[in-house]
Image (tube, rainbow, N blue to C red):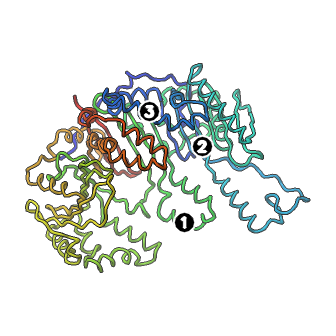
Amino acid sequence: MALDRTSSDTGDRANSESFDSNCPPASRLLPSDTYVYLRIRDTTDLKAGFSRSSLGKMLNDPAMRPFVSDTYETLSETLAEFASQIGLSLDELLAIPQGQIALGVVPGAPPEAEPTPAPNRGPNQDAGNPEETDEEIARRLQRQRRQQNSFAFVLIVETGEKNDSQATMRELLAEIGELSEKNQFVRGEEKIGEHTLTSWRRPRGRGQHLEWFERDGVFVIGVGRRAAADVLERWNESDEPRNRKEAAERARDTDSQIVEISGNLSSNADFGVVMTRSVSAEAETPQITFFVHPYAIAQKIISRSGSAFFIMPIVDTLGAEKIRGIGGSIFRGGDLVENIIHVHVVIDPPRDGFFGVVRPEAVEPTPPNWVPADVTKYTTAQWDIATASDNLTKIVDRFAGEGSFDRFAEDRIKARLDVSLRDEVIPNLTGRYVGVQRYQLPAAWNALARLDALQVRDADKANELLKKVKTKLPASDMQRENIGGVEVYFMQNSRELPDTLRTPQRSIALIDDYLMLADSRELIEQVIKTRAGRNSSLIDDPDYALMISELGAKLEGEKPFLLNFARDADSYRVFYDMAASSTFSETLLRRGENNRVAKRFGDLLDRQQLPSFDELRKYFGVSGSFGYDESGGLHFGLMNLRPLE
């Protein structure tokens, strides 16, 4: 079935309350080598949007209000000890952000120079002392490595000016200052331009360092030396005449524009690629954007140890340096589309090392006729298994020695089952995977029964292999049953599980040209009935047709290697039914004998009577996701649709 391309609605931001911000986007205030970046563009708009979301409407349902109110009070009581230390309640803390809020993990500033020891000082008293022992030298070098490869943290919170939020934030910082003073931190102030930077640091400048400043109703807090100071200097520089053009562009409030000011994050080419692919994918400005540089983080962490010379070559050989960045955006839609999430992974070509195993191919999205219409989730993907297997073999053999992959996998399977993974199994796989999940009572953490299917080229050969495997295993491990004309082999369950978990009934079967592994008898029976035409099939389901049409519009002609469809109601029901079950509340109460938090929430669930989930199902629609491959990386998208009235 081809993916239809239709245009989705443009959203409802125009109807929402928004905050008039005076702050540049955080990506223009953080350094270009920022490791982790998360930004909420407008918390006022986000809060208003949540109340209109499916989950927000459900929580506001009259039948749910007693439970929601009780839960909030329980949470407030749980955090009461923390709130008493800072002098603010949970309500006051949540009300502080009004506009932009952002978090950044950035490189720590180089350590301050340690004083040179005086010639007449005693042994073992300071760095560089010629009378240091080898053990003391090793500790000093380790401390220097950690300081030179440290991380710093930046929090940007916009409250607005001359309002309660600004006053509450000042009160919070004053409380933090008093706690710092009690812990013998030293207070300092520094004038940067027209603004004052306040800092608290350990004596002699070692150890923790906290600093902050306030500007135009925006509070910037830094953990680490110069973390907040660098933000203020970058902000001041953006106000210089040569950067006034950038100030005009700032009104567009988007992360996707590359603006070169003191090497800010917006000027980072990898960040720019991620934002262009994620932000520009929609007509609206996203509510949330994020970016991570995993290789740079790993490089920093490894460099903090004394084994970097050994570990880094292995990491580089695996091709980890080819991951230039992972990031994306989150949008709120309108009458039809509730949420749209984009995630983009920037990968440098050629794809060797680990990325030689990443071999996605275009997949046929149409569900096989045996997929039931009432599934909770349907997933299909296509992979070049043969090439991926060859490249995986090369990686394992390179690090573990020639022939290691065969010893670990091929030889063991051959000895155990008389089946060759390389010659008999992999060549017979087309590379298409189909996964099905279906909600199954009673309520349990693993209430979603699962079936995984691999398509084979030759069903007769697959059937011969299946029979050969049965002869090599004890009869109790594969008990054959005929269900609706299909031979299903049920496996023996090896262990008992607690009441909060469903006991799996594992089975394996060959249906048409798919080799299936299921963990539920009920699910495999439903699949067989659907194949025989006794149950409705997902391919004829109107919810699936609607979602596949909307996903087609987002793909814009790209061929997906991954496609997913899900019924959001069933996904939420797993947790809802668990919360409503007496088994779960009794478990929490038992654990509450030694855990006050568990006892509070156990009491909460025990005293509240939740309504039937069928009363709340009306608030949820369906969702879908996709992934496609392109020369510069991988792109993923996820979309939630509102329920149709």
Count how many numbered circles sit on residues in the image: 3
Q: Rate crowding at label 2 as few (under 14), some (14 to 19) or many (20 or more) other CA atoms within 10 Å.
A: many
The residue type indicated by label 2 comes to Phe
Q: Rate crowding at label 1 as few (under 14), some (14 to 19) or many (20 or more) other CA atoms within 10 Å.
A: few
- Choose the circle earlier in sequence order: 1 or 2: 2
The residue type indicated by label 3 comes to Tyr
Q: Position of residue 562 (x, y in %)?
A: 30, 51
Q: Position of residue 225 (x, y in %)?
A: 68, 43
* Of marks 1 and 2, the one in the foreground: 2
Q: Name the residue tied to disc 3.
A: 72
**Residue 7 appears in the picture as rendered:** no
Q: Position of residue 482 (x, y in %)?
A: 10, 64
Above or below: residue 579 compared with residue 241: below
The residue type indicated by label 1 comes to Pro
Q: Name the residue tied to disc 1.
A: 313
Image quadrant containing the C terminus: top left
Q: Position of residue 161 (x, y in %)?
A: 59, 21
Q: Rate crowding at label 3 as few (under 14), some (14 to 19) or many (20 or more) other CA atoms within 10 Å.
A: some
- Choose the circle earlier in sequence order: 3 or 1: 3
> Residue furthest toward the right?
120
Q: Name the residue tied to disc 2.
A: 153
Which residue occupies the foreground of this view, 343 or 629?
A: 343
